[in-house]
Image (tube, grey):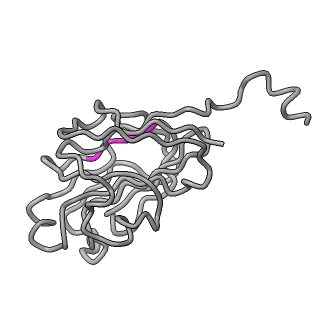
Amino acid sequence: MFKKLFSKGNEAPKDIEIYTPITGEFVKIEDIPDPVFAQKMMGEGFGVKPAEGIVVSPISGVVDNVFPTKHAIGLKADNGLEVLVHIGLDTVQLNGEGFKTFVESGDHVKVGDKLVEFDIDYIDQNAKSTISPVIITNTDQTDHISIKDQTTLTKGESKVIDVTVK
């Protein structure tokens, strides 16, 4: 009760936009060739078939987790929304080979800030797929999710998801 009385509107907005972190081709979540993502076991989202090996932040917030193998980054928005950017499929087995990170846990980022560079050819040859899922991992904390079906995506510019958190 006191939090509501004294916060004076300092609460983070409940609406947030998620931009594509990678330039490439839009892939519906159901079409990602991995059942964990396609069946939304980790949450709602979309995939990107990369045209280049640069990952930027899809939201403004804090870097919550940089996986030791550099194949995935977890981000958290001020309103609590959690977004996972997973570069390629079955890339954890690469043990960081072909990835270079530019952030670490606790860093504050804005939409478009560079997070990771990756070698598309190396991933294509050594992992299951280059298709990179972008997942809202706490979908249960959302009231509304609207995904814009698109074809071509430009990192940091193409808005893909509108979300309202509870």
Residue 67: quadrant of the picture:
bottom left
Residue at the spot 39% in from the left edge and 34% down from the top edge: 111
Residue 130 against residue 17 in the figure, above or below:
below
Residue at position x 29%, y 33% from top?
Answer: 158
Looking at the picture, how far across and down is residue 50, in whole percent? 17, 51
Q: Please tell me which residue is depicted at 24% across the width and 74% down the height of the picture.
A: 94
Residue occupying the far bottom of the picture:
93
| Magenta residues, start to end | 55-59
Location of the N terminus (image quadrant): top right
Q: Looking at the picture, how far across and down is residue 98, in whole percent?
A: 19, 64
The x, y position of residue 91, in whole percent, is 26, 70
**Number of callouts in the render?**
0
Residue 33 position (above or below residue 76): below
- For image coordinates 52% across by 50% down, the residue present is 82
For the C terminus, the image quarter is top right
By secondary structure, the bulk of the magenta-drawn segment is best described as loop
Q: Is residue 117 left or right of residue 11?
A: left
**Left or right of 117 on screen, residue 139:** right
Q: Position of residue 126 (x, y in %)?
A: 14, 74
